[in-house]
Amino acid sequence: MFRTLSGRFLILTVAFVMLAEVLIFVPSIARFRLDYLTDRMERAQIASLALLGANDMIDDAVEAELLENAGVLNVVLRRDALRQLVLSSDLPGPVTRTVDLRDPPVSALIRDAVVRFARPGPEVIRVIAEPAQGGGVQIEAAIETSDLHRAMIDYGMNILWLSLVISVITSVFLFLAVRRLMVVPIKSLVAQMIRYAAAPEDANRIIEPRSSVRELREAETTLRDLETQLSQSLRQKERLAQLGAAVAKISHDLRNILTTATLLADRMEMVDDPTVRRVAPKIVASLTRAVNLTEGTLAFGRAEEAPPALQMVPLARVLDEVCESEQLSIDVASVEIRHDVPPAMTVRLDPEQMHRILGNLIRNARQAIQATGRPGEVRITAEEDADTWTVRVSDTGPGLPARAQENLFQAFQGNVRKGGTGLGLAIASELVRGHGGTLALERSGEGGTVFRIDLPKAAGDV
């Protein structure tokens, strides 16, 4: 029971009810003592008035009976200036203290009650009070405290048992309520977690929020979002694993094919045709990059990029190759691809990886413009400051859809064109991060799209 929420709630309820009763008990027992002594003084006043009405002609037996019924040992009544011992008997001991009931402070009542409750031994006390109904100026009585102490004990036990009954009944109802409103829904939530954990790839096992309690519904909603994200991530990782295995298999055979194609392209350079001479080096360079990429993939044996081989390279030289390769695949009249980078500007980068990065961005921009059926332009610019090289790839295309912008650099989710795999920008972003830089979408709209590449100048940032 101590390990369950409902059991602990039950025990805490009993403890708190008892604590509340203890806080209530102290002033209650003080009030009980005051009422007890006040009642004895009223009886003593009645007994003394009966004796005065008999003109003091009363025998000892009747006097003793009056004192016994009043619960006092003697009575002193003060009427006007006369102070008179009306009833008396032998005291069992000396008077140990005086209790004044004429407008006593609350603190004194509580203190005296606690002292009397803690002292079981019999004592004789002198009680002073004002007579009821104007029956005099002052009345005093000697009282033996044994009966008072027993009455206080009986009263305390009654409060104790009543408190226990109240706490048990309250706790049982609260136990049932907490179990129905909290424990059962929490157990259901835990059972759903266990069920989902058995097959997290199964979207049918994702929880549907149903609780009417706001806090539990928020927990169910949060769990649903977490399970949805986890299921999507697992499916994506599984897809990536399958893709990686497929790429490794394809790369193994593709390397041999590309090697043969490279040999054939080398022989094309011997042809006298000017067009062939101009195109052949581009083909050879492209095939060389493809071979290097394939060998790198096989060497790592996983879907991770090799670390970049950074060196200071004229950026214009890389852009000349990329722009010319992309321009060969399309007429200049439909899409013009050019760059405005000074030849003297050198940047720390990996030429092969930067060729892939810029090639992907330019190709996406070119295809976006072609899809509109209108002529356009792809332009690359670069600038530098004391800490950073900045390269911008801008186009005059229609801009990116809002959905594509939300997951632009996420694998399989950032498709910028119909039929795309959604891997190009994700790979480009990973390659830029390998350089220590960032790839970001600076703006996109009806006026076109601009991607920005920031590369650090400090070698320690890589």
Image (tube, rainbow, N blue to C red):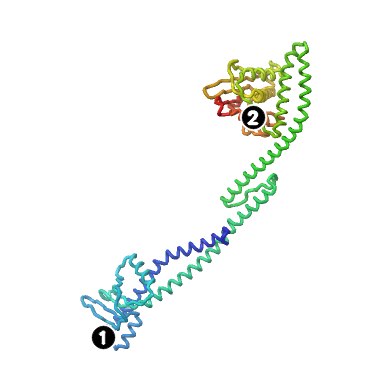
Quarter of the rendering occupied by the N terminus: bottom right
Numbered mark located on residue 176 in the image: none
**What kind of residue is marked 2?**
Pro
Residue 138, position as x, y percentages in the image: 26, 74
Q: Is residue 17 left or right of residue 358?
A: left
Q: Is residue 19 left or right of residue 296?
A: left
Residue 94, position as x, y percentages in the image: 29, 78
Whether pointer 1 and pointer 2 mark residues with C-beta atoms closer than 8 Å, the reply is: no
**What kind of residue is marked 1?**
Asp
| Mark 1: few/some/many CA within 10 Å (<14, 14-19, 20+) | few
Q: In which quarter of the view is residue 374 placed?
A: top right
| Mark 2: few/some/many CA within 10 Å (<14, 14-19, 20+) | few
Query: In front here: 277 or 201?
Result: 277
Q: Is residue 62 above or below residue 250?
A: below
Residue 4, position as x, y percentages in the image: 58, 59
First along the sequence among labels 1 and 2: 1
Q: Is residue 39 above or below residue 57?
A: above
Q: Secondary structure at mark 1?
A: loop
Query: In front here: 450 or 129?
Result: 450
Q: Residue at x 65, y 43 (%)?
A: 230
Q: In which quarter of the view is residue 456 placed?
A: top right
Marks 1/2: CA–CA distance: 121 Å
Q: Is residue 419 above or below residue 36?
A: above
Numbered mark located on residue 307 in the image: 2
Q: Is residue 311 left or right of residue 276?
A: left
What residue does disc 1 label?
56
Q: Residue at x 60, y 17 (%)?
A: 341
Residue 366, position as x, y percentages in the image: 67, 22
